[in-house]
Amino acid sequence: MTTFQVALIGGDGIGPEVTAAAQRVVDAIGEGSRFTVEWQPVAAGGAAIDAHGSALRDEDLLACQRADAVLLGAVGGPQWDDPTAAVRPEQALFRLRGGLGLFANLRPVHAEPALIGASPLRPELVAGVDMLIVRELTGGLYFGERTEAAGERGEEPRTARDTLPYAEDEIERVVRLAFELARARRRHLTSVDKANVLATSRLWRTIADELSADFPDVTLEHRLVDACAMQLVTSPQSFDVIVTENLFGDILSDEASVIAGSLGMLPSASLGERRTEHGVFGLYEPVHGSAPDIAGRGVANPLGAILSAAMMLRWSLGQPDAAAAIEAGVRGALAAGVRTPDLGGESGTLAVAAAVIDHVVRGAGQTTPMGATA
């Protein structure tokens, strides 16, 4: 039996609840697939600040580096919301991305048939949507030099500055990955930028055009970010793979959650270039935040975390059949009417996990990966 080492970061708010649900599902599928996961708890975010005074300690980053993969819940909460604080929960995310060499965030957006009615968009717009958003993760505004505003109201006019740097190699590696992913799907890549205004976007577009010569079988199109934002809700079926820079990807992928019916449905994978014995090393997390308003009530939607765990099995642990079985279990549970409150139902977090496990064990539903094209 194969044993995998996975660093488990429950984090804050509903993070520990949804990761516990995902952990149960992975353990259940492992029993029938002849693998086991040794879960290594790691503190990060607000919980780590309270316990250790740091959003992520050196030894905890090292534990993540030594693992086969990392599963993360969410970080942050109102008690740590002071943007002027020297130590903040989000610092753990930035340190994980940099320290683990994770430069690409993959966010699949799939319209599950049982949830088409949960989307605020018209059913005919949502049906059949199957897109993958690839977000650059370690550059741009979030990592550029900044100058904070100083002084008090009524004194000298306050100013602040954020810079948006991108280097050629940063753009090339994430756009190349997006081309490769598009080649394995429907061979259509949309590169999103703001090239009519931003110098970095013009560099981004130039590099994407240059790389397209290496992928003659993939159709490349460029969209300005504002036009893309509109088309995500007016013609989402037109997208296959979207690749874009850090800030744009953060915003667009959250907007795309309306297609899936809830932000709680979206999984993600953050990948780099490092390979392990079993696959590509990565960090996996649901797209949603820590949702402190419902933390501890047992009603959080765990499906984004469960589907993130399925991505982990496929990409990092070399278990595609187990991943497909979990995705089929999610599909079966939804088809049976299992819903958390965010989807208009009354099922609790652990009840949803139990329903997924039940469908996995019974082999209900199909085993085609969610969002895969035939």
Image (cartoon, rainbow, N blue to C red):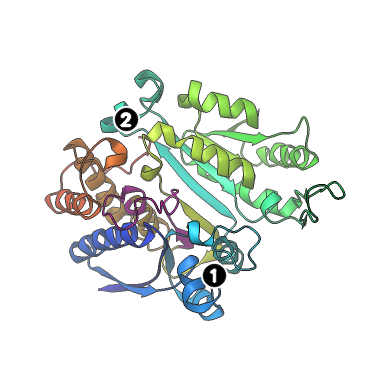
Can you identify the residue that label 1 sits on? 55
Which three-letter amino acid code belongs to the residue tagged 1? Answer: Ala
What label sits on residue 371 in the rendered view? none
Task: Say if 183 sits above or below 27 in the image.
Answer: above
Across and down, in percent, residue 292 comes to: 40, 54
- Among numbered discs 1 and 2, the one appearing first in the sequence: 1
The residue stretch that appears in magenta: 280-306
72 or 75, which is in the foreground? Answer: 75
Across and down, in percent, residue 156 comes to: 87, 49
What type of secondary structure mainly makes up the magenta span? Answer: loop
Task: Say if 94 sits above or below 326 in the image.
Answer: below
* 1 or 2: mark nearer the eye: 1
Which residue is at a point 80% across and 55% down the rendered structure image?
Answer: 151
Q: How crowded is mark 1: few (under 14 residues within 10 Å), some or many (20 or more)?
A: many
Secondary element at tag 2: helix
Secondary element at tag 1: loop
Can you identify the residue that label 2 sits on? 118
Across and down, in percent, residue 203 comes to: 77, 41
